[in-house]
Amino acid sequence: MIVCTTIQELKAHLAQQRKNKPDGVIGIVPTMGFLHEGHASLMKRAREDCNYTVLTIFVNPLQFGPNEDFDRYPRDLERDSALALANGIDLLFAPTVQEMYPTKPLTKVLVSEVTERLCGASRPGHFDGVGTVVSKLLNLVQPDRAYFGMKDAQQVAVIEQMVHDLNMPVRIVRCETVREADGLAMSSRNVYLSADQRKQAVILSETLRAAESWLKQPGMTRLKLSKLIADSIRSVPLAEIDYAELLTYPNLSPIDANTEISALSQTIIIALAVKFGSTRLIDNRLFQLGGGDTNVQNNDEIQTSPGDRHGSEPQLCGQHHH
Amino acid sequence: MIVCTTIQELKAHLAQQRKNKPDGVIGIVPTMGFLHEGHASLMKRAREDCNYTVLTIFVNPLQFGPNEDFDRYPRDLERDSALALANGIDLLFAPTVQEMYPTKPLTKVLVSEVTERLCGASRPGHFDGVGTVVSKLLNLVQPDRAYFGMKDAQQVAVIEQMVHDLNMPVRIVRCETVREADGLAMSSRNVYLSADQRKQAVILSETLRAAESWLKQPGMTRLKLSKLIADSIRSVPLAEIDYAELLTYPNLSPIDANTEISALSQTIIIALAVKFGSTRLIDNRLFQLGGGDTNVQNNDEIQTSPGDRHGSEPQLCGQHHH
């Protein structure tokens, strides 16, 4: 595995690879490092699909707000390198902030509408930073495929929209959220949790699982379901809801309060952001509704419909819990 | 020469070309059509530098304001095709608005600072549209080099900034403004001018030429020069100044009123936008100052310094008047 920190080295290695294998498929797994099993599943999938896989590790200051955890975001390049190697990564690119932003960045890639709710509302500017840095990484690596985890479902929706709108020559591959044994979605931020918080944090995945049966109840409206979800999360004392929303996916449009959920024919998302102390956790689940004949997906199924509006042909890879 | 109007055809032809000539250099000349000698000079230069040249013709609605001339912008694809063929273009891509924007575009590429003055101030949103469509065209064609005319000097500065900030894998090549025999900068909008307006429009290039000697006068300040320039343009009765500015280039930073011009060590631009009736013409000239030892460039010289701050290595191709 090649490890490089400069754009010049990265480009030289990629040029060599392209020369050696002109028809090779190049995959990118963009991350902020402090890798866990969720990242490992992205790397494994990229390795299966591609001839050459690039892992990027970059904690991007542009996507952190002034009061967010940029400085204390966990970093461990040595451990990450070992995990990348173990997962068959060919090239690890870990640039410095100076390397990625050598001059004051004046250009931003902004996506509207899809960014207006959920984390876009809670974290102003966050998705501007995401769109901009993902554009940079895609332009630097010029991959055929890019792998993103569905735990950040809104991020996937934003990137798919950007790729579609700007005709970026890359296929976005959606990969399933990986969870701890008790259901907690894997996240680099889980290390922030105290023992008590960690125990109570399972309420996010439990609520999403419970929602699967609530959805099927006759006469279940969006408003009633919202209330059930919020009450469920508030049942643990350390949880403070940032948002708990039901929206269409990937458009992230709101659903009227009195809409009967089982009558919807779109894919919907239940998306949660919950704070435990100063640690903010997110989780979500997609449900493919049948317009009366409710067909609830669980997390182990492959969801295929959401990206179909786009020419970028996103794919979802299933990833089972461990 | 291949002519195509769909992205699918474009991509198929480019893939074939890349397969036939893996090391070939691909050049793009993005235009809004209604081609003139200025465009011809871009095509010639691209043909000299590259193995395969793509001309794009697309009148981009995103870069026109609501009260601008999108609908009446002149179009003549038949004449343009003949000119492209005569200039050795390999592929002409002329998509419809529907092809370029099949769904409501939610993504914008925005450049700040460099876009705040000149046409950015006069035409709000103009450069957002330019950045977005140029990003799309670059992503579709994936050229090695892209050719732009220096008549739109601010556009060149914006695109260079965008390419630099987003690490776009393309080299921007600056090409000299081409002029009519009397000095009027070639523009598709020149066809709008009445006979009287056409005669008086030469005041733009005459003022820029006169500025070359004004610059050399001892004690010439930015304020005095601004006044001389404005007075010169106002000497013709049909001219109405939109802007007439002296700025640094390519940063487009203002210069203090009392700064002695000959003391500056940067490249400066004198940029003009002047309306004749409802027709708005632009022109500009760059001057490389020596910090006391004024070295005025004329339009036939090759300017090399302005893009040096960027990694994208812009080049300027000289183009003599006809």
Image (tube, coloured by chain):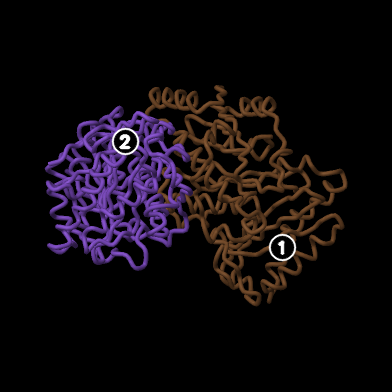
Chain colours: A purple, B brown
Query: What residue is rendered at 41% in x and 32% in y?
Result: A265
Q: Amino acid at mark 1?
A: Ala
Query: What residue is rendered at 35% in x and 39% in y?
Result: A142
Which quadrant would the N terminus of chain B be assigned to in this image? top right
Circle 1 marks a residue in which chain?
Answer: B
Q: Nearer the viewer, residue A173 or A308?
A: A308
Q: Nearer the viewer, residue B154 or A263?
A: A263
Task: Kindly report the distance in space between the C-alpha atoms of the residues bearing marks 2 and 1.
Answer: 53 Å
Return the x and y of residue A158 as percentages of the image width and height: 40, 45
- Specify the quadrant of the image occupied by residue A105: bottom left
Q: Where A197 sits versus B100, above or below? A: below
User: In front: mark 2 or mark 1?
Assistant: 2
Name the residue tied to disc 2.
A145
Query: What residue is rendered at 66% in x and 60% in y?
Result: B270
Name the residue tied to disc 1.
B211
In the displayed structure, does residue B92 sit left or right of residue A151?
Answer: right
Q: Are marks 2 and 1 on the same chain?
A: no
Residue A240 in view of the camera: yes
Circle 1 residues within 10 Å: few <14, some 14–19, many ≥20: many
Which quadrant would the C terminus of chain B be assigned to in this image? top right
Which residue appears farthest toward the front when viewing the image? A219
In the displayed structure, does residue B280 sit left or right of residue B112?
Answer: right
Circle 2 residues within 10 Å: few <14, some 14–19, many ≥20: many
- Secondary structure of the residue carrying tag 2 is strand
Q: Where A308 sits versus B158, above or below? A: above
Return the x and y of residue B54 as percentages of the image width and height: 53, 31
- Specify the quadrant of the image occupied by residue B255: bottom right
Q: Amino acid at mark 2?
A: Arg
- Say how many tags the image has: 2
